Image (cartoon, rainbow, N blue to C red):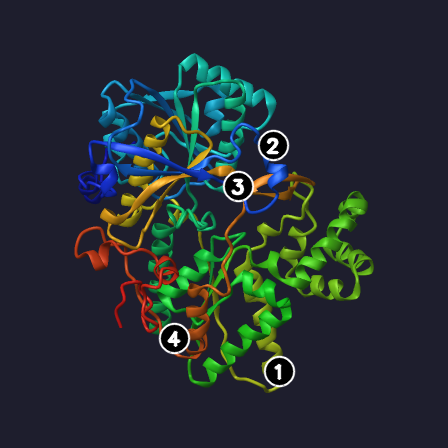
Amino acid sequence: MSADKSCLQKARVAYQPKLPKALREGNIRVELGAPTEPATDKTDIKKLFPHTYGQPLAKIIEGESNLNSGPMKVGVVLSGGQAPGGHNVIAGVYDALKAANKDNRLFGFLKGPGGCIKGKYKELTNEIIDNYRNTGGFDMIMSGRDKIEKPEDLAACLANFAEMDLDGLVIIGGDDSNTNAAMLAEYLRAQNSKTRVIGVPKTIDGDMKNEMIEASFGFDTATKTYSELIGNICRDATSAVKYWHFVRLMGRAASHVALECALQTHPNICLVSEEIEEKGTTLDEIVSYIADVVVKRAAAGKNYGILVVPEGLPEFISDIKAMIDELSNILGKDEKYIRELGEHSEKAQYLSGQLSDHSARVYASLPEDAQEVLLKRDSHGNVPLSQVETERLLIDLVHDKIRSMKSKGKTEAKFSPLGHFFGYEGRCAFPSNFDADYCYSLGYAAAQLVRADLTGYTVNVQNLTKSSDEWLAGGTPVTMMLNMEMRKGKPTPVIKKALVELDGEPFKHFAANREEWAINDCYVFPGPIQYFGPSEVCDQPTCTLALEKGLVKKDCCCGCGCK
């Protein structure tokens, strides 16, 4: 870390995150409940996880300790994309281990799971930990996207952990990383290794949650960061009164980020991928809907507005999905021939004769740069739809629609669009007080699960809309959360991603208000994340979590219950 520190960074180091009451006491006990099983695919999952299947839920409570008092050696690794609060998870693990026994030691594996495979690590000390408390980023030990799944990689980890005499490993990651943690736990137990594996739920996308995991860490900070930027743009739009801003946000598989930011800021349009898929909405229908709002606002003298869209939207649009399936088949047969065609116009003409009539029209309607992207294939042989800049695609198509309407005398709307993508800006922000507290509690609780000799669990902290005194910590067996999905052409155990529920309170609240937000300027300006001040300003959870727990009045949008 740089020796130069901002005033905020210096002040945040002094912040002491709040813990659940059970974790603050000297005596910490882990109690186990009844055996568990997954909701589906039980036979397949039991076959794949014979040594860790059916484990009980774990609860951390006050009481006479039944935990290993050490000395112990524990490792920690950051896996996947960054999320605010990761350093506090590590600090929580460290502080919990040292509170249990001053001779306990914590080692950080470097650059993600690859560090476990290669045996690259460093011991984490007071000096290192104290330098990173309540800071954003994963730069303490860095992250990576390697997976520990090949036989040789599993064997390498087994040998490295044995050489280190490692008692436990805490893997901080998303749904794939926690699934990978379960596979590693299963392998190590089958090999009679003493190293226990505990996962921590991380992702700003908000799609790793279920009945046991109320929220993934980082979602709170990231959406508040994006909402500040969107609120700033809303203010700019009402000041300049001449621009339409199209904002693309993170969220390839789920629209939680876009929906949460819409609840915080009230844009004129927010597209929710899950709704579009459910209704079978076509690309032309989406473009027509946006153009209709643009025209109606123009008629009211408002040639400006805000649109929010998740980056993964194209994968949920019915006719684009159908076109992509056809395109994949054509590329599978004729990719070499198509690549050898000279001009893009020649390639487009060839495809128009190979695609079905409807898919050919959809392909032809796309801007040329999007057409070019769709003629490529990624390392898995798939069309790289994620490389399409969704906001640019919509801008181009809506522009064409408005021009067509103007040529027919149907509108006099002035449409001057600007595109934005907010992604990396939110991944390494200073964690909000909520994420600082939540992540520290997750880390502190993860250490207790290691001390309880548990493996193949994901740590959880519940009751998150209550005060931290009422938070409840524990662990969920990963096998309980698994289902079988097709990955790279074969059935694979994975933790199911949580998509936006259309019958859930967050989406229902949005749907009940979006018509008014579309035409009127109902913008909310959240401003920057606040770290110091009254609790109702500094410590509130997301609107999504508050609505899910029934804490917000129908006419409140900010999560604090105000009018």
The residue where tag 3 is placed is 37
Circle 1 packing at 10 Å, graded few (<14), some (14-19), many (20+), is few
Q: Secondary structure at mark 4?
A: loop
Quadrant housing residue 86: top left
Residue 546 seen in the current view: yes
Q: Disc 2 versus disc 4: distance between alpha carbons?
A: 59 Å
Residue drawn 38% across and 70% down? 237
Residue 324 location, quadrant: bottom right
**Closer to the camera in the image, 38 or 98:** 38
The answer to whether residue 89 is left or right of residue 211 is left
Mark positioned earlier in the residue sequence (2 or 1) = 2
- Amino acid found under the numbered disc labelled 1: Ser
Gap in Å between the C-alphas at discs 2 and 1? 62 Å
- CB within 8 Å, label 4 to label 1: no
Where is 401 relative to 395, above or below? below
Front residue of 360/77: it is 77
Q: CA distance from mark 2 to mark 3?
A: 13 Å
Residue at the disc numbered 1: 407
Determine the CA span between mark 4 and mark 1: 24 Å
Dot placed on the residue nearer the N-terminal end, 3 or 1 = 3
Q: Which residue is mark 2?
A: 48
Instruction: Decide which of tag 2 and tag 4 comes sooner along the chain.
Output: 2
Q: Earlier in the sequence, mark 2 or mark 3?
A: 3
Determine crowd level at label 4: few under 14, some 14-19, many 20+ residues with C-alpha closer than 10 A. some
Mark 4 vs 1, N-terminal side: 4
Label 2 is placed on what type of residue? Answer: Leu
The answer to whether residue 453 is left or right of residue 176 is left
N-terminal of the pair, mark 4 or mark 3, is 3
Write the residue at 50% across / 33% down.
Answer: 182
Q: Are marks 2 and 1 in contact (CB under 8 Å)?
A: no
Mark 2: secondary structure = helix
| Mark 3 residue type | Glu
